[in-house]
Image (tube, rainbow, N blue to C red):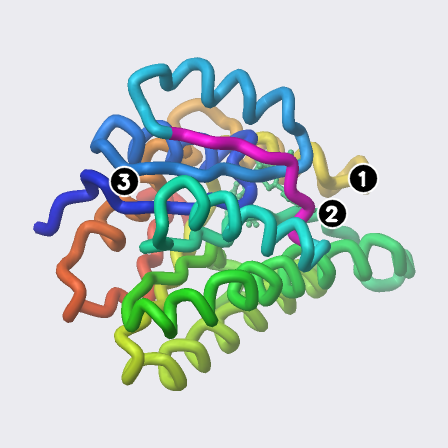
């Protein structure tokens, strides 16, 4: 397997959960990192805990194209190229459609879909010029299956799967790889984005029951594997779920 050492990787949504674990995993393998999210204090703590790594952080809201471009610029200024863009940010305020939570629908579309597109837009011109690059997005088992109470969330993850497959088809000639990581239940803070009390409790139990949900580190291993494969290998998707998950 190719080495992760010196790979320049941007992680959008690195302040907790899967993004944070991926930053830690890649840093231990010698990757050069630029990390972004809205909770800059968490990014600072993460960067400070990885003292031996080359890591830069910056507040970045994935719904703002200018923030994503600023992350790409930071990577170019510090490292002169971008090998990997990991579009990991996401929220999951699930509820039945009949509750008409229009603001939550909009937020999910903005963060989970537009966030990925903004991440793609920030690096694609650079990667085309480089004639190499790898764009990764965190999708979900919810990009394959629809659950009651999760219609909009599932819709965003179905959309990301379609967008990333389109990216693969359009950019393969430019040597740009596209991968989605599709986890099942992972024990993270994601359930805290659910405002509907019943759904929140259900998802919390699902993700956080000790011994059931995957750890963020286990998903980070999958991300590291996809990044570490040689350039001529396109891992389009890694679907990874707890053994006991339906
Ligand atoms: P966390 O809540 O721990 O992490 C979510 C990350 O997304 C945080 O770093 C958060 O940072 C960031 N984020 C959210 N909104 C924005 C925004 N507007 N701009 C920038 N960053 C943002 O949960 P997970 O680690 O579980 O979630 C990571 C991804 O994994 C998501 O896409 C999620 O849909 C997906 N996923 C999770 C599963 C699970 O069971 N946990 C299962 C399948 C997929 P901040 O709030 O600081 O901005």
Q: Name above or below for residue 185 compared with residue 42.
A: below
Which SS class for mark 2? loop
The residue segment tinted magenta is 55-62
Residue at image point 49% right, 58% down:
139
**Is ligand 1 closer than 8 angstroms to the Cβ of mark 2?**
no
Q: Is residue 40 left or right of residue 25?
A: right
Ligand 1 lies in which image quarter?
top right
Magenta-span inclusion, residue 18: no
Q: Nearer the viewer, residue 73 or 137?
A: 73
Residue under label 3: 221
Mark nearer the viewer, 3 or 1: 3
Question: Is 98 or 22 nearer to us in this picture?
Answer: 22
Residue at the image position 33 percent from the left and 46 percent from the top = 8
Residue nearest the viewer, comparing 211 with 56: 56
Counting residues from the start of the chain, the first of labels 1 and 2 encountered is 2
Q: CA distance from mark 2 to mark 3?
A: 26 Å
Q: Are marks 2 and 3 in contact (CB under 8 Å)?
A: no
Q: Are marks 1 and 2 in contact (CB under 8 Å)?
A: yes
Tell me the quarter of the picture where residue 63 sits: bottom right
Q: Quadrant of residue 43?
A: top right
């Amino acid at each position: 397997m190719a080495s992760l050492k010196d790979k320049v990787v941007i992680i959008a949504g690195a302040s907790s959960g899967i993004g944070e674990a991926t930053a830690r995993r890649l840093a231990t393998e010698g990757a050069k990192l630029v990390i972004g999210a809205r909770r800059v204090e968490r990014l600072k703590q993460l960067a400070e805990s990885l003292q031996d790594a080359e890591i830069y952080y910056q507040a970045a809201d994935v719904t703002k194209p200018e923030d994503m471009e600023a992350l790409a610029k930071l990577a170019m200024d510090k490292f002169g190229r971008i090998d990997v863009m990991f579009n990991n940010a996401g929220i999951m305020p699930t509820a039945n459609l009949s509750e008409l939570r229009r603001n939550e629908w909009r937020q999910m579309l903005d963060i989970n879909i537009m966030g990925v597109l903004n991440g793609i837009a920030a690096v694609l011109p650079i990667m085309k010029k480089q004639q190499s690059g790898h764009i990764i997005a965190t999708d979900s088992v919810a990009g394959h299956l629809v659950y009651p109470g999760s219609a909009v969330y599932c819709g965003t993850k179905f959309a990301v799967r379609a967008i990333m497959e389109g990216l693969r088809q359009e950019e393969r000639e430019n040597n740009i790889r596209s991968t989605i990581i599709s986890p099942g239940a992972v024990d993270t803070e994601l359930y805290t984005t659910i405002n509907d009390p019943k759904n929140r409790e259900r998802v919390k139990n699902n993700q956080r029951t000790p011994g059931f949900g995957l750890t963020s580190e286990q998903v980070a291993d999958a991300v590291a594997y996809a990044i570490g494969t040689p350039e001529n290998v396109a891992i389009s998707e890694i679907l990874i779920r707890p053994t006991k998950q339906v």
